[in-house]
Image (cartoon, rainbow, N blue to C red):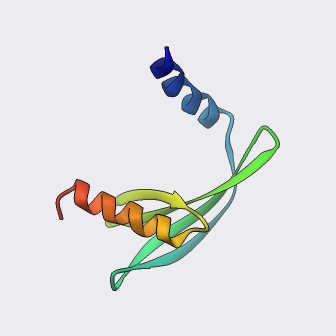
Amino acid sequence: MRLTLALVFPLTLIACTEVVSEREGTFNYRGETLRAVTREYSTNGNTFTKRVIYDGNRPVSCSATDDADCRAALSYEKLDRND
């Protein structure tokens, strides 16, 4: 039952979410300058922001305000693909 809810809830959230604004930028990671896109979303009257950093053609989602979170997400993504 919990697994079903865990799968259904994100799909429901995505279906009701719209992008309010989008900003292009860059993120520096270990000497590399990577493309970054920060999006502000609106859902049910609330807003939240996410940042997506592109490591080559692979998107890595992380906090829009916490660079340490983005560094950790990039590090994990690189370990996951065995670079």
Residue 56 found in image quarter: bottom left
Q: Position of residue 59 (x, y in %)?
A: 40, 57
| The residue positioned farthest toward the top in the image shown | 1
Q: Position of residue 14 (x, y in %)?
A: 60, 36
Residue 4 located left or right of residue 19: left
- In this rendering, the answer to whether 71 lies above or below 18 is below
Residue 45 located left or right of residue 81: right
Tell me the residue at 78%/46% (across/down).
46
Residue 32 found in image quarter: bottom left
Residue 35 found in image quarter: bottom left
Number of numbered discs on residues: 0
| The residue positioned farthest toward the right in the image shown | 45
Q: Position of residue 5 (x, y in %)?
A: 54, 21
Choose between 56 and 72: the one closer to the eye.
Answer: 72
Tell me the residue at 41%/58% (across/down).
60
Tell me the residue at 48%/18% (across/down).
4
| The residue positioned farthest toward the left in the image shown | 82
Quarter of the rendering occupied by the C terminus: bottom left
Q: Position of residue 48 (x, y in %)?
A: 69, 53
Tell me the residue at 49%/26% (across/down).
7
Choose between 26 and 65: the one closer to the eye.
Answer: 65
- In this rendering, the answer to whether 75 lies above or below 26 is above
